[in-house]
Amino acid sequence: MLYVGLDLSRKRIDFHALREDGELVERGALPADPDGLARLVYRLGGHDREVLAVIESMNGARFVHDQLELAGFEVEIADAQRVKGDGDRKASAVYAKAFSENPEFYSFYRSLEAYRAGFKNKSDVLVLEPNADFFKYLKSPGKGSK
């Protein structure tokens, strides 16, 4: 079996082809048009192996999928938006659980987010009173109170 990862963009198709043992067989980039697909099939079909291709794309994947299937490849489409959405949902559930079990952690986490937002550039400057809430976790690690 030859495993092929395809990253599809408007102008080109980047690909990596690996053997079952993970050894790189071939990699490259071709135009994202019918001629480019024909060249891809020709290049990868010459390895005398079944091919499993996975397409990572948000647009145009169906055309590429259908053309590669016609050439005898087994083809799957990895939906990047759906995968990202699944990850975001899982992360939200973990945060919600942690925050509900430990409100002090939630307060600390929000403070870290405020620090990150407050210091986006090296040239950023904040002018604050020494006893400002912004500093409460820096002054007493582990103790969120003033």
Image (cartoon, rainbow, N blue to C red):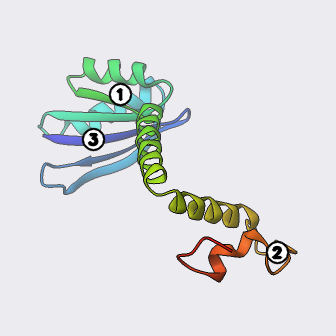
Q: Nearer the viewer, residue 92 or 98?
A: 98
Q: Residue at x 54, y 57 (%)?
A: 106
Q: Quadrant of residue 51?
A: top left
Q: Residue at x 71, y 61 (%)?
A: 117
Q: Amino acid at mark 3?
A: Val
Mark 1 is on which residue type?
Ala
| In front: label 3 or label 1 | 3
Q: Secondary structure at mark 2?
A: loop
Between the C-alphas of marks 2 and 3, the distance is 45 Å
Is residue 134 placed above or below 13 in the rendered structure?
A: below
Question: CA gap, disc 3 to disc 1?
Answer: 15 Å
Q: Residue at x 52, y 56 (%)?
A: 103
Chain-order first, disc 2 or disc 3: 3
Answer few, some or many: residues within 10 Å of disc 3's Cα (few below 14, many 20 plus, some between 14 and 19). Answer: many
| Residue bearing mark 2 | 123
Q: Secondary structure at mark 1?
A: helix
Q: Is residue 54 left or right of residue 121?
A: left
Q: Is residue 17 left or right of residue 21?
A: right
Query: Which residue is outermost to the front?
Result: 146
The residue pinned by badge 1 equals 38
